[in-house]
Image (cartoon, rainbow, N blue to C red):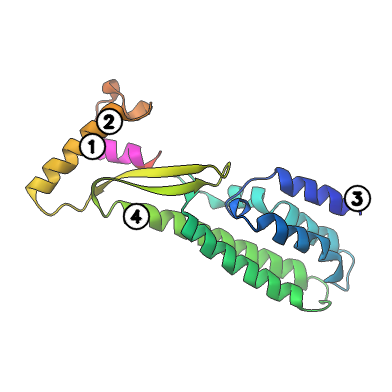
Amino acid sequence: MALLLCLGMTAALAHGCLHCHNNFSEKFFFYRHHVNLKSWWVGDIPVSGALLADWSQDTMRELHLAIPAEITRENLEQVARTVYRKMDQLYQGKMYFPGYFPNELRAIFREQVQLIQNAIIKSRIDCQRHCGIFQYETISCHNCSDSHVVCFGYNCESSAQWEKAVRGLLIYILIAPSISCLEPGANLTLESASECLTEH
């Protein structure tokens, strides 16, 4: 009982992409408090409990992104549906043989990390397929706050579009919040400004 209480407190303090989903607390509360019913071998229980308790922190550590971990609500919903469906299926079984349950948890965890990575990167690539400054709404995986991503897209088809895009970039630099790589002394080029936006 003390172990389960400790696991619950640890998860409540953690942050991560899936943690930002509104059903996370309810779902993982159930998963943690039913883990002792899923294996014939008592050694699987603390291992599985630790995997569930550290899910959010381990997710952030395993993402390995060179850009901020910010995901759209739509993509977060898709990741959550996939993870919960697979976890619910795993929990529908009765007792599993030694080692099986924690191994399945690890497989679901790894798939979740891959889904989050792909969603974040794809959104950035799609953003850069526009012409000029473009932004989209996201959620920060670090603190679950609303955020947005700004990028500069190169997909301009005419000189007039390019002119408008560069003018929009210059205006954004003038009014943008304090970003050191966009400051006047930063020796900006179109490429360096675009790279700067990608990193923030």
Mark 3, Cα crowd under 10 Å, few <14 / some 14-19 / many 20+, is few
Q: Distance from label 4 to label 3 (Cα)?
A: 46 Å
For disc 2, the marked residue is 173
Tell me the quarter of the image containing the C terminus: top left
Q: Which numbered mark, 4 or 3, is in the foreground of this view?
A: 3
Q: Secondary structure at mark 4?
A: helix
Disc 3 or 2, which lies upstream in sequence?
3
Q: Distance from label 1 to label 2 (Cα)?
A: 6 Å
Residue 66 locus on image (x, y percent): 45, 45
Q: Amino acid at mark 3?
A: Ala
Residue 32 locus on image (x, y percent): 79, 60
Mark 2, Cα crowd under 10 Å, few <14 / some 14-19 / many 20+, is some
Residue at the limit of the structure toward the top, as seen here: 185
Q: Secondary structure at mark 2?
A: helix
Q: Which mark is residue 169?
A: 1
The magenta stretch spans which residues? 189-197
Disc 2 or 4, which lies upstream in sequence?
4
Q: Is residue 133 magenta?
A: no
Mark 4 near mark 1, Cβ–Cβ under 8 Å? no
Q: Quadrant of residue 102?
A: bottom right
Mark 4, Cα crowd under 10 Å, few <14 / some 14-19 / many 20+, is some
Q: In the image, 139: left or right of 160?
A: right
For disc 4, the marked residue is 125
Mark 3 near mark 1, Cβ–Cβ under 8 Å? no
